[in-house]
Amino acid sequence: MSAYPALVITIPLLATFVGTGCYWLNRKLCYPVALLGLAGSLYTSVCLLIKVMAKGSIGHYHAGWTPPWGIEYRVDLLNSFVLVIIGSVALINLVASYLNIEQEMSEKSGIFYPLYLLFVTGLSGVVITGDLFNLYVLLEVTSLSAYALIAMGSKDRAPLASLNYVFIGVIGASFFLLGTGYLYIMTGSLNMVNVGALLPELYSSQAILVGFVFCIIGVWIKMAFFPLHVWLPNAYTYAPIAASRVIAPLMTKAMVYVMIRLMLTVFRPEYIYAVLDLQNVIVWLSCLAIVAGAVMALAQKNVMKMLTYIIVSEIGYMVGGAWLGNQAGMTGSVLHILNDALMTFCLFLAVGNIGVLGKGFRLDSLQGIFQKMPVTMACFVLGGLSIIGVPPTCGFFSKWYLLNGAIQAGHYAFLVALLLSSLVNVILFFRIFEIGFFEPMSHGHTYAHQSGGAIQEAPISMLVPLILVSFGLLVVGLYSGLIVQQIIVPFLT
Amino acid sequence: MHEFFMEIVDKYNYWLYIILMMIGLYAMIVKNNLIKKLVGMNIFQTAIILFYISIGYKEDATLPIIVNAHGVHSPEELAINTAEYINPLPHVLMLTAIVVSVATLGVALALSVKVYQQYKTLEEDEIRMRIRESSL
């Protein structure tokens, strides 16, 4: 039981090596090994969440070295919560994507699974670690596997999109490393809790300010916060669908988690909200991100690209909520990590199912899609409604907290930006519903007569996960009061 | 003027890493050739590695191995003066960072091979032209 924090990382990492070995011996084993690895990781993170909820946070010291010297994996309510999200999205996606993977890259699929596992390993590591340098290394493990996964996508555009991601991603990670260096010079420590305890005496120091700026800009680059988002749309659009379905919901959300961790544990709220005079500027920046993301999404003619710009806009929600400086805003931001991961995942799953038809993702190729794929599109509608923020779905509740936070902080521009982007989302999704529901099929009447009414639904193994996730949207929505009371409020107070 | 100059000379290691970093960043932003961009990326990463190496260094200090400790067992005699030894931690961290930067470079080079196979060029403007042609 005491080794659980280490097991969250070790199980998928071991499965990565075993899976790579299987690629040479027997390719059919790669998939079950990946499934087992992810299931093990998810099981341990659920156990951790239950344990942390009962007994408070746990520290795991690697090789028995105590905190300021050794690497500590520190599990509290926030990161065990994010770990469960990562584990479940990764596992469900692997089940849903099996057919996609086998079709899209028949001979390369053996390589795909270990990379996928390595990505999840790195991501869980980023979330669970309590050491700044360890965070950098795991961040690079995650990014490197993400570059490789993205490059396996569409033959003509994916390598270039991935290469652009490499250039920008390296700048982001290096900035984070540099900021960590400044913190290390000033405090002599790399352990997050210890740095947090040593910093208050140094709050007036310029070096700490520079370190903070480097760290936060590095994290922003990695999470695609608005002016730094240029790598994201192409990378996520041209990636293989099985990969973008896991990278899009998780990568950016994990980076939002890192930002919140830096703000609350390392720099502490006294520094962030009182000493630094940046709060207002950053909330304005996030207003800009929200509006710009929504407007750019309007200009897209491809469903996948549209969704990627919606992610850019949603990042603005979470950054803004965290920087509002009150509990409602922070609660909304943390809750939105869960909700946005689920909503994006649901939409990407649905879009992946549409891809089975083989007609691409252009908006005008979606005519008559509701007749062909009624179940997939029903789930897509649910995901869309959740992004818009219609009450019984989960998207409404985090937006509610964010709006409350904006009113409490008196920051009405953020309020307006939130409402405006919700309205733009209404246009975005209802445009798709209109094309899919009311516009007749374009390619000649004879074709429409032959196959117009026929249902061409995606295979059952892809439908079940999608239905599960879209029910999840409703369940999380209905129980979000419980999640806030049991997990988020105890963490923040 | 003199004071300003002394300020720079005093902290020359920081100035050096900033200059190197800017050279790398400049190459990544301005250069048109993907390989030149990669070289810029590597200079950028190396600058940060140099920064870390320099902060562990102390004047007149030696390797962090306790001098004449062989055969001594009482803890009083083993008490050490930290000013005599350089700080090994940043150097150890950089071993990992070097591995990371090598891996990144490897992945990036592999990707540029893929890009070259696709477009038969590594010049960014030409690639952009090809993409525009193919999307028409």
Image (cartoon, coloured by chain):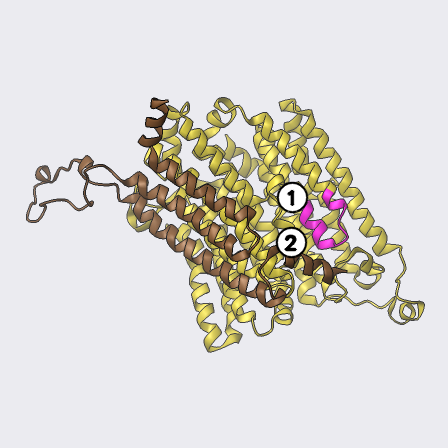
Chain colours: A yellow, B brown
Which chain contains the residue that carries disc 2?
Answer: A
Is residue A103 one of those drawn in magenta?
no
Q: Residue furthest front?
A: B1
Q: Amino acid at mark 1?
A: Val
What's drawn in magenta, residue-wise? Answer: A296-311
Q: Residue at x 9, y 37 (%)?
A: B76
On the rendered structure, is A171 left or right of A1? right
Main structural element of the magenta stretch: helix, strand or loop?
A: helix
Q: Nearer the viewer, residue A285 or B136?
A: B136
Q: Position of residue A219 (x, y in %)?
A: 52, 41
User: Which residue is under mark 2?
Assistant: A234
| First along the sequence among labels 2 and 1 | 2
| Residue A297 located within the stretch drawn in magenta | yes
Q: Nearer the viewer, mark 2 or mark 1?
A: 2
Residue located 40% across and 25% down the image: A205
- Mark 2 lies on a secondary structure that is helix
Q: Residue furthest bottom?
A: A25
In the image, taking residue A98 as reference, residue A210 lies left or right, namely: left
Q: Given contact means CB atoms under 8 Å apart, are the residues at marks 2 and 1 in contact?
A: no
Q: Residue at left 50%, top 35%?
A: A491
For label 1, the SS is: helix
Q: Is residue B18 above or below residue A444?
A: above
Q: Label 1 is found on which chain of the structure?
A: A
Callout 2, which amino acid? Asn
Q: Residue A312's mark?
A: 1
Residue A42 visible at all: no
Taking the view exactly as shown, the residue that stands out farthest to the right is: A445
